[in-house]
Amino acid sequence: MELEYLEEVKHLLHGRSYNVVGKDVKRVDGIEKLTGLAKYAADFLVERALRVKAVRSPYAHAVVKRIDKASALKVPGVEAVITAEDVPGENQIGYLVDDQPILTTKARYIGDIVALVAARDERTAWEGADRVQVEYEELAAIFDPREALKSSIKIHEHSNIAADAKIRKGNADEAFRHCDVIVERTYRAGSQDHAYIEPEAAVAIPTGMRGVTVIGTTQNPFRTRHTVARVLGWKDSEVTVMTPYIGGGFGGKDTYGPLICCLATLAAVKLGRPAMIVYPRYESFAYRFKRGPFEIRYKTGATKDGKVRAIQVDYIVDAGGYATWSVGFTKRAAYHATGVYEVENVKVDGVAVYTNNLPNAAFNGFGNPQMLFAAESQMDIMAEALNMDPVEFRLKNALVPGSRTGTNQLLDHAVGIKELIQKVAEKADWSSKRAQYASDKTGKKRRGIGVGCSWHGCGTTGFKRDWAGASVIVNPDGSVSYSTGIVEIGQGTITSHAMMVAEVLGVPFERVRVDANNTGTMPDSGETHAQRGTIIGGTAAVDAALKIRKRMNKLAAELWECSEEEVAFENGETYNLNHPAQRILFKDLAYEMYMRGIPPAEYGFIKARRGFPDPETGQGDAYAAYTFGCTIAEVEVDLETGQVDVLRLIPGVAAGKIIQPAVVKGQVYGCGLLGLGYALTEKVVRKEGRMMNPSYTDYLIPTIKDMPEMADLVVVEDEFKYSGFGAKGVGEIAFIATPLAITNALYQAVGIRFHEIPLGMEKIYFALREKKSHGSRS
């Protein structure tokens, strides 16, 4: 994104204020979703579609010795049993590492898929799956990543190490020798389920001799297309992936999308008939991949003037049976290990280790909630050791324009975290509330206030697809057709794109129609994750719209015999700035384009403006830009029961230009509730690799009744000059900050520092009892 799109747009708009961007509009998908007309993957019921069911390993680690299909094939209505030997192309769907077969001959977690059954209806498919006879040789299993590092048992042939990450900046060992205060603690951040409303589903429809259309629950249609083609042994161009509305993704349908689509497609292509697969709730809960668990040893050193001088971080990630996205978030966690602070001396070592637990998925925050739980706990402990206020300590160390990150990336602009911390603290009435809660220690309930700061690089991590495409067509009647490779998963991205296109072309927002996502009509746009939908996908939209706008500028200048600099577009009209009487309706100018043979359509394509940190030192430009967050939480704790009530959240973001204020507010508030769950209730209980609470009865997600009072969102618009309208991303940042603020507030309330999340009421209860019996802080 070398072009400074922000200045380019402002120049074409002649410095006028925006008519669409930054305003609240009706969402493109709003009416369909409100009226129930919106279609999701499982709604695409195709006549004669076969139903597909997976045969799963009951063992965490086992070799498949033999699969007997005969009994299953005798069930009336069962059309086929598909095993690894039936895969026509490569039996490989590994995300960043080629370690995961679509149908395996060696199970590496409970639920690993060894075969598929295709049948005429759901019940028959289930019966057929139950009749498939699989002979296993059970192997010794490993569920502890530290044990896996030492064990001679190999989950994969090469090694039990799935990925690693390093940061080397300055000389941390030397810097610690000059520190006045050093704090070292171990933290654990556990797994979390996505708990989205819509379970995984896919429909595959053969089209001719060598073609297939797939409709599925995926956040990454282009990677899904490539994975399906790879499994079939086809070219990408022979597979079309269409993504309907997604009923919640949070990253889970990024990781699982290619897998679920491959399952349906294998059956459809083998049998030459449409096939579909829809997970029931239990199967979705028990076997979909989840947030990766971290164990982090974090050491911080500071001088008595309150400056953090060095950090040393060692962490281990439980990758589960396959590497999936563990490769990416192990690195992202390292790149963000300093928190939102400038630290001159950084030493970070992280490793992701194969175990026989369920593999990991991308999830909101992507390694940062785990790492920043440790980093922000450390900041509070350090502040107390230095006798400084936690907010004051953070402000003293916060990144500012001109700072360098732990990867030594220069942040020359769009760095609003310091201003954000100040504004959020002021909004929360931080100083007086903190003093009030510190002094009020009577009764059976205690209150506390805490702060958490977060940052998140916008875009993918490492050597991955960080580009996006878009197309804009101006129709002869002046309406505009827009297409994007970015997926709408509820975050409002397609509406943001339409707003940006409308603003550039000077037409009312309602004149822009967003067409369905389709890999057959759009350049590869990478994944929809990592806060990249607007900063990268939206900039591709602006890129396409700018190309057309410049053509239309030139045409209008020719009509009026004036310079292109004098032409303005606004509210569906084009006019001469110096001679306002010279004006033409946008639709008439559009028709004139067609009459003169001027191309009315354009593709935009953007590659993120970033580098690739060195694998040995971690030094380099990891992301194009960073979004910053700060949340302050107020909690109340019942000393007798351990019940925690989050009374109030005061969230803030520094996310560049806010395109849709109401949608951003909704995203941040929703992320607050998601973060509350990760802090307090959403504990994945595992026993020997099996999820023991795979239902909404036992896996406790917060509901609207648990929603705390939400203060008005604090916004710092630290615009990024290389993106359309200066926007950054906002979808993950508020979630990351919330559990950090809650756990720090708990410490002020009860004087106990919790080093593990999610907490659970019972953990708090027993910690309070232990503290009471010892009569001292811990």
Image: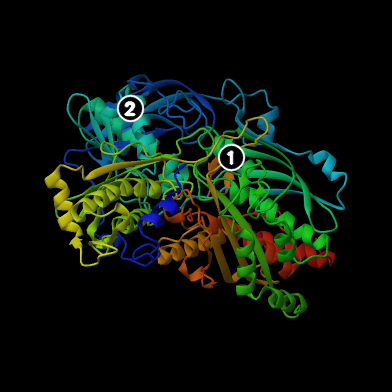
Res. 397 in view: yes
Q: In which quarter of the image is the C terminus?
A: bottom right
Q: Which amino acid does label 2 sit on?
A: Ala
Q: Which of 530 and 628 is in front in this view?
A: 628
Disc 1, SS: loop
Position in image of residue 211 (x %, y %): 23, 28
Q: Residue at x 30, y 62 (%)?
A: 30
Give the CA distance from mark 1 to mark 2. 33 Å
In the image, is 23 to the left or to the right of 773?
Answer: left
Q: Which element is circle 2 on?
A: helix
Residue 282: mark? none
Q: Crowdedness of circle 1 by 10 Å Cα count: few (<14), some, many (20+)?
A: many
Which of the two residues, 775 or 658, is positioned nearer the viewer here?
658
Q: Residue furthest front?
A: 561
Q: Which residue does the numbered mark 1 point to in the structure image?
A: 621
Residue 38 vertical placement versus 118 (above, below): below
Q: Identify which residue, 582 or 441, lies in the foreground.
A: 582
Residue 116, given in percent of the width and then of the height, sits at 34, 31
- The residue to which callout 2 is attached is 229
Instruction: Residue at 67%, 66% (x, y): give it.
Output: 450
Instruction: Give the colour scheme shown.
Output: rainbow
Left or right: where 460 falls relative to 496:
right
Who comes first in sequence, dot 1 or dot 2? Answer: 2
Total marks placed: 2
Residue 584 sits in quarter = bottom left
Q: Which of marks 1 and 2 is in front?
A: 1
